Image (cartoon, grey):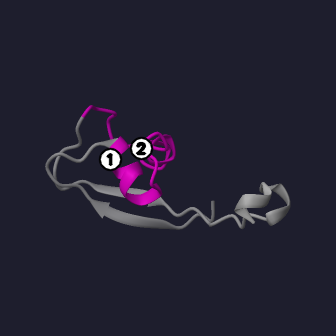
Amino acid sequence: MTGQYIEHITTDGDRWDLLAWRYYGDPHDYERIIVANPEVAIAAALPSGLKIRIPVIEDVAVTEAGLPPWKR
């Protein structure tokens, strides 16, 4: 992680897993968002109007060496 964040203002219906899906493409990757926002209570749904920090993840280059031949 680079230490950079995207600021997200919550709206009605926002949840930790939905934020992870929106920003990372994986709803199970919400833990890093929770860790970046220790002052926010962990609840099923987030209140509207909160400023949430979304950690920026650097893309990791995938090398062809580890890929099967049909994916190279």
Toward the right, the furthest residue is: 65
Amino acid carrying label 1: it is: Leu
Residue 67 locus on image (x, y percent): 78, 56
Residue 2 or residue 13, whichever sits in front: 13
Compared to residue 33, the image places residue 2 above or below, namely below
Residue 11 locus on image (x, y percent): 17, 54
Residue 58 counted in the magenta span: no
Residue linked to disc 1? 18
Q: Which residue is located at x 69 percent, y 64 percent?
A: 60
Residue 3 or residue 16, whichever sits in front: 16
Residue 30 counted in the magenta span: yes
| Secondary structure category for the residue under label 1 | helix
Residue linked to disc 2? 27
Residue 58 or residue 4, whichever sits in front: 58
Quadrant in the picture for the C terminus? bottom right
Amino acid carrying label 2: it is: Pro
What stretch of residues is rendered in magenta? 17-44
